[in-house]
């Protein structure tokens, strides 16, 4: 998920980035860090970036062609639906945000694991 605020994001403005997901952390755009993590996660087969123009993100994509871009919706929920529909492969579709530079393969793997149904107390 790489949506943006209609009025501009303070982090993007402060760093001079055209989009929050492209703001650098330690000199590396956050989106690049997230995409590297997803590529390093064995359970990830496809990566879809939702809500960020592919042309804007081109320099931040470590493996061009390995990432699909889809347009976002009017709300975060609508954007998530766009991404899920694009991935519709019958597999787990964990939703990770492009501005999560500390994401790890273990976190990605854990989020894709089935969860037991909650039991009412």
Image (cartoon, rainbow, N blue to C red):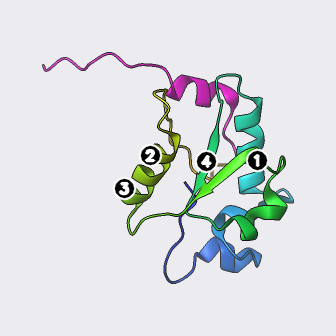
Badge 4: residue crowd in 10 Å (few <14, some 14–19, many ≥20)? some
Is residue 23 shown to the viewer in this render?
Answer: no
Question: What span is colored magenta in the figure?
Answer: 102-121
Mark in front: 2 vs 1: 2
Q: Which mark is residue 85?
A: 2
| In the image, residue 85 above or below residue 73 | above
> Residue visible at 48% across and 28% down?
92
Separation of marks 2 and 1 at Cα, in angstroms: 24 Å
Mark in front: 2 vs 4: 2
Furthest residue toward left = 121
Quick one: quadrant of the N terminus? Answer: bottom right
Mark in front: 1 vs 4: 4
Separation of marks 1 and 3 at Cα, in angstroms: 24 Å
Reading the chain from its start, which is encountered first: label 1 or label 4? Answer: 1
Separation of marks 1 and 4 at Cα, in angstroms: 15 Å
Q: Which mark is residue 48?
A: 4
- Residue 115 at x, y percent in the picture: 38, 19
| In the image, residue 54 above or below residue 40 | below
Horizontal side of 63 relative to 87 (left or right) equals right
SS label for mark 3: helix
Badge 2: residue crowd in 10 Å (few <14, some 14–19, many ≥20)? few
Horizontal side of 67 relative to 81 (left or right) equals right
SS label for mark 4: strand
Q: Is 99 in front, or is 71? A: 71
Horizontal side of 32 relative to 6 (left or right) equals right
Tag 2 and tag 4, C-beta contact below 8 Å: no
């Amino acid at each position: 998920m790489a949506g943006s605020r209609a009025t501009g994001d303070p982090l993007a403005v402060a760093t001079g980035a055209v989009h929050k997901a492209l703001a650098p952390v330690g000199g590396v755009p956050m989106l690049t860090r997230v995409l590297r993590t997803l590529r390093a996660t064995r359970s990830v087969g496809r990566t879809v970036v939702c809500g960020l123009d592919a042309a804007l993100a081109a320099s931040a994509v470590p493996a061009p062609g390995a990432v699909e871009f889809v347009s976002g919706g009017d709300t975060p929920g609508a954007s998530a639906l766009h991404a899920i529909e694009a991935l519709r492969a019958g597999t787990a579709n964990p939703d990770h945000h492009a501005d999560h530079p500390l994401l790890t393969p273990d976190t990605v793997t854990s989020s894709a694991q089935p969860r037991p149904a909650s039991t009412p107390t």
